Image: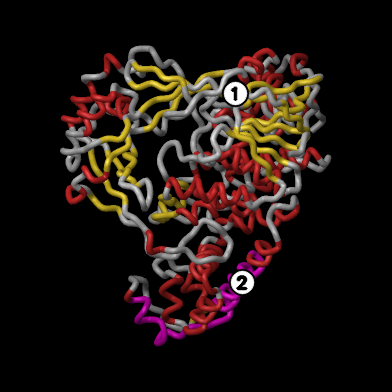
């Protein structure tokens, strides 16, 4: 083993795996330390990747050269593209995964990276010298030295689980917590808080009457997350199922409220607003007679199911009796009850945009310890921390994405600029430039950037070049080809759009909302030929061309808006400036600016409590 590393990654969850892979692939000598090497990127909650805005994040990770998309494709047992009824800015891919296979695929990926080494142990202390982190010490007493350390410990730091009145120390059911790190960081001036998350009971699928539930099959189209060119095995797809609570279920749950750690004061940590427990839902939405639940398969070779929407920390017998009242669950058996978990996090305003901490150099935080929730948000942070730690070891320029470049940029800017007062979850509504940040164009936005830092390889660049050329063929043909009424009117009437009265450029027909390119290629042989030339990526490239045609005006307008706002990002702020001397801005603004130390006027304008008039004062002071 190498006695000294460039980068040490602590934790083998979604953030840790992406961080270690990125660092090692960028030729940094990397060590990944985790407590259990059989649980890389373990899906602690539901066995699914993607969803609203989260699917965009996975595609962005893939476009840069990360692995979450590839691993998801390899372990996928169902695919759906959400928000199809809305515009392409809202389309979000989601995949149900085989939980066990997902972890195995991640292990296979990590073990294929030559410059990545592993050590199974628990990190108990950071080696700190002169205000800089120089390595870690483990429970076994081994001291590993490194130039950078990335901490991605998830829910394990001082983790405490709750089932009714029962408390268990741990970072995940059946797994021990980690101690020592928060206490040491507090000594060095770090603010440490507590957050909460929860998970539902796991169900024995043999005890469910699926005939009473609503089946939710996946899509049959050959869709995937990665932009790499390969085929998927769609023969292994499985359905999910929809069930509903009822008033009898709610009544059973209410019997356990006095023993609920959520309601009796045992849990005082902040939980996720957008993924509440079932007891939270029936109190907050007391007027609702039912709540929707999703029964999701855990994998192809197991009978275990995850009941999405039924997270709970009530006593196990209360959870069980309530489940029995759900239609189709009359004979249900559970493998383990749901539980809540409290854990330490470090408010992310203590970070730079590179995810390096402000108080200790060479130390990076990524994942749930930054106050986020979700595999995708964690993976994105891990990727960016791994990239920046590796770049800094070589003295290279940092890699930071703007809010107009990626959802990853929105995520990190929100964290370090605004902070969190509850577990942060990404939504499309958090992004100002949703039309620019679509799931279909993540490669066009980010692959070339990934290549400049040494992550996205030649194969990805060639595929991007080919995609652009083929999409351009569609656009050029549509702009040049004139279609006659007799050739297209029957089709136009069949899709409910007015017939042509004279010849017209085909692009004008393609712009009509009722006309889909997938239908148009059946009518025009030349378009069909372009589609066939795209091979496995036919749907992807067709979709890219259609969006470029139909939304050209909106895309241009949003790009102009982004470029105007971006000018503020180019006005830098002195990191040592004394804001207290600016008496013409509000007290709150002075306090927030002094704490967060924004790097640019643009970042300062996004800080909660800093008003437009405060920004005007700053600009005047700077001679702007």
Q: Which residue is mark 2?
A: 472
- Residue 482 lies, with reference to residue 307, above or below; the image says below
Write the residue at 44% across / 65% down.
222
Whether residue 616 is visible: no
**Side of 350 relative to 274 (left or right):** right
The colouring scheme, among rainbow, by chain, secondary structure or one colour, is secondary structure
**Side of 82 relative to 457 (left or right):** left
Label 1: how many Cα within 10 Å (few below 14, some 14–19, many 20+): many
**Number of marks in the rendered image:** 2
Provide the residue span drawn in magenta.
464-493
Q: Quadrant of the C terminus?
A: top right
Q: Which residue is mark 1?
A: 347
Q: Quadrant of residue 233?
A: bottom left
The CA span between labels 1 and 2 is 46 Å
Dot 1: what SS? loop
Whether residue 289 is visible: yes
Q: Quadrant of residue 610?
A: top right
Write the residue at 52% across / 82% down.
529
Residue 284 x/y as whole percent? 31, 25
Rendered image: mark on residue 430: none
Q: Main secondary structure of the magenta part?
A: helix
Q: Quadrant of residue 226?
A: bottom right
């Amino acid at each position: 083993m190498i006695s000294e590393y460039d980068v040490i990654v602590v934790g083998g969850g979604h953030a840790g795996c992406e961080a270690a892979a990125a660092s090692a692939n960028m030729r940094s000598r990397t060590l990944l330390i985790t407590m259990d090497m059989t649980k890389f990127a373990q899906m602690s909650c539901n066995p699914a990747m993607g969803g609203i805005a989260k699917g965009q994040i996975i595609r962005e990770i893939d476009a840069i050269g990360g692995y979450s998309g590839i691993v998801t494709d390899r372990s996928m047992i169902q695919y759906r593209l959400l928000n199809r009824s809305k515009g392409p800015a809202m389309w979000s891919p989601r995949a149900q995964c085989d939980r066990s296979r997902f972890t195995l695929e991640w292990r296979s990926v990590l073990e294929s990276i030559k410059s990545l080494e592993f050590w199974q142990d628990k990190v108990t202390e950071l080696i700190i010298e002169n205000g800089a982190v120089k390595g870690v010490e483990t429970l076994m007493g081994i001291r590993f030295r490194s130039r950078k350390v990335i901490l991605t410990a998830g829910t394990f730091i001082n983790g405490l689980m709750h089932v009714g009145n029962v408390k268990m120390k741990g970072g995940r059911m059946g797994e021990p917590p980690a101690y020592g790190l928060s206490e040491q960081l507090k000594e060095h001036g770090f603010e440490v808080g507590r957050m909460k998350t929860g998970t539902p009971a796991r169900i024995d699928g043999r005890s469910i009457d699926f005939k009473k539930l609503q089946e939710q099959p996946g899509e049959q189209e050959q869709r995937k997350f990665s932009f790499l060119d390969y085929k998927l095995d769609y023969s292994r797809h499985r359905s999910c199922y929809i069930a509903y609570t009822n008033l009898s279920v709610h009544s059973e749950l209410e019997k356990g409220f006095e023993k609920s750690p959520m309601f009796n004061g045992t849990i005082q940590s902040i939980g996720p607003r957008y993924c509440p427990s079932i007891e939270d839902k029936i109190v907050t939405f007391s007027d609702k007679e039912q709540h929707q639940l999703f029964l999701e398969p855990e994998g192809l070779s197991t009978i275990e199911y995850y009941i999405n929407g039924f997270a709970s920390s009530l006593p196990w017998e209360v959870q069980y009796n309530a489940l029995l009242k759900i239609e189709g669950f009359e004979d249900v058996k559970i493998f383990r009850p749901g539980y809540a978990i409290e854990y330490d996090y470090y408010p992310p305003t203590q970070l730079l945009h590179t995810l390096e901490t402000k108080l200790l150099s060479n130390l990076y935080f990524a994942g749930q310890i930054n106050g986020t929730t979700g595999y995708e948000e964690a993976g994105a942070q891990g990727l960016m921390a791994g990239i920046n730690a590796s770049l800094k070891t070589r003295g290279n320029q940092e890699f930071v994405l703007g809010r107009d470049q990626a959802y990853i940029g929105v995520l990190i800017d929100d964290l370090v600029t605004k902070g969190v007062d509850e577990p942060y979850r990404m939504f499309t509504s958090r992004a100002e430039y949703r039309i620019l940040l679509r799931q279909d164009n993540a490669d066009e936005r980010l692959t070339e950037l990934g290549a400049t830092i040494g992550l996205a390889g030649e194969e990805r660049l060639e595929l991007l070049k080919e995609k652009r050329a083929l999409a351009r063929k569609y656009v050029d043909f549509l702009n040049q080809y004139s279609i006659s009424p007799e050739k297209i009117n029957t089709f136009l009437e069949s899709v409910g759009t007015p017939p042509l009265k004279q010849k017209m450029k085909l692009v004008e027909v393609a712009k009509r909302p009722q006309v889909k390119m997938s239908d148009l290629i059946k009518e025009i042989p030349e378009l069909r030929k372009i589609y066939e030339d795209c091979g496995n990526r036919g749907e992807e490239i067709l979709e890219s061309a259609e969006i470029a045609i139909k939304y050209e005006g909106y895309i241009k307008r949003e790009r102009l808006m982004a470029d105007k706002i971006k000018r503020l990002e180019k006005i830098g702020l002195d990191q040592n400036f004394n804001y207290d001397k600016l008496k013409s801005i509000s007290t709150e603004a002075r306090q927030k600016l002094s704490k967060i130390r924004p790097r640019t006027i643009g970042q300062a304008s996004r800080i909660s409590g800093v008003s437009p008039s405060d920004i005007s004062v700053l600009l005047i002071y700077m001679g702007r």
